[in-house]
């Protein structure tokens, strides 16, 4: 199955109760299907539900600015959410919804084969790390999984709601850029600070760092 076929198969997904709780449409994900860097958020909000695209509106604009600060653009990356349908009144996703929808995210990751997955906020981070761990404890660090590296970041919406988090988020994107720069091997003709699928080379530094939770 291709990414496009998966998106088509979920077009009218009814597999969890969010299908009947007022969603406008399934928000599958957007971006480069061969991206080496993928971003994963929580769930669509009002604007995303209306447009059918993750991270539009104010949080999307902030994300675009932060991406630019790390020399990344929306064309280079792929963005999806753990949950593909908007929870009513933007409530937190419920565990049965995460359990039902997560396999679709994992299929997206398998098809895109990113080397780095940046999780935005607690939900995406805990879902992919499969640990109940607070985002502030793990943010801006690399976690080496079997097939890719997870780099958790605060959710841009959190910085919009609590202005004091904005500087932290900016700092963390600087650390993301440093990480990308350290692992990018651009061909002579390419922009040194624009990692692409062929240039991002991430190997675990040593086995001891494979499991940072001990
Ligand atoms: S949230 Fe996921 S599992 Fe639930 S209906 Fe939407 S696409 Fe299907």
Image (tube, grey):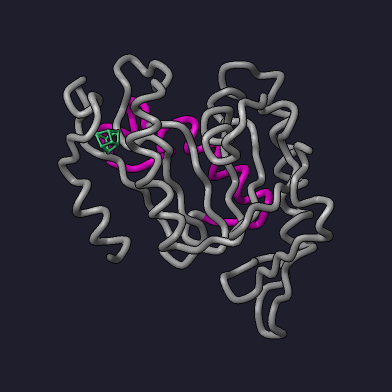
Q: What is the quadrant of residue 165 in the picture?
A: top right
**Residue reaching furthest to the bottom:** 188
Relative image position of residue 122 (x, y in whole percent): 58, 27
Pick whichever, 77 or 11, lies toward us: 11
Residue 139: within the magenta?
A: no
Quadrant of the frame with the C terminus: top right
Pick whichever, 206 or 154, lies toward us: 206
Position of residue 141 in the picture relative to residue 35 (left or right) = right
Q: What is the quadrant of residue 163 in the picture?
A: top right
Relative image position of residue 66 (x, y in whole percent): 62, 43
**SS assignment for the magenta stretch, majority:** helix
Quadrant of the frame with the N terminus: bottom left
Number of numbered callouts drawn:
0
Q: Which residue is drawn at 32% across and 22% down?
A: 87
Pick whichever, 120 or 123, lies toward us: 123
Relative image position of residue 50 (x, y in whole percent): 25, 33
Relative image position of residue 47 (x, y in whole percent): 33, 30
Vertical placement of 126 versus 20: above or below? Answer: below
Q: Residue at x 75, y 51 (%)?
A: 210
Q: Residue at x 69, y 70 (%)?
A: 201
Q: Which residue is drawn at 18% across and 46% down?
A: 11
Image quadrant, ligand 1? top left
Residue 53: within the magenta?
A: yes
Span highlighted in magenta in the image:
44-73
Q: What is the quadrant of residue 62 in the picture?
A: top right
Vertical placement of 201 versus 130: above or below? Answer: below
Position of residue 46 in the picture relative to residue 172 (left or right) = left
Position of residue 163 in the picture relative to residue 22 (left or right) = right
């Amino acid at each position: 199955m291709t990414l496009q076929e998966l998106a088509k198969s979920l077009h009218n997904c009814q597999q969890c109760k969010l299908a009947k709780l007022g969603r406008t449409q399934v928000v599958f994900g957007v971006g480069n299907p061969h991206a080496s860097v993928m971003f994963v958020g929580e769930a669509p909000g009002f604007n995303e539900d209306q447009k059918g695209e993750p991270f539009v509106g104010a949080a999307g604009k902030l994300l675009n600015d932060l991406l630019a600060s790390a020399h990344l653009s929306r064309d280079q990356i792929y963005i999806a959410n753990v949950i593909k349908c908007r929870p009513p009144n933007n409530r937190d996703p419920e565990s049965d919804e995460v359990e039902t929808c997560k396999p679709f995210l994992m299929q997206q990751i398998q098809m895109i084969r990113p080397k780095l997955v940046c999780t935005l906020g607690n939900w995406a981070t805990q879902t992919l790390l499969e640990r109940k761990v607070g985002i502030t404890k793990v943010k801006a660090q690399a976690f080496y999984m079997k097939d890719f590296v997870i780099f958790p970041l605060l959710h841009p919406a959190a910085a919009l709601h609590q202005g004091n988090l904005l500087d932290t988020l900016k700092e963390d994107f600087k650390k993301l850029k440093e990480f990308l720069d350290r692992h990018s091997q651009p061909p002579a003709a390419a922009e040194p600070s624009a990692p692409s699928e062929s240039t991002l080379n991430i190997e675990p530094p040593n086995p001891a760092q494979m499991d940072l939770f001990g």
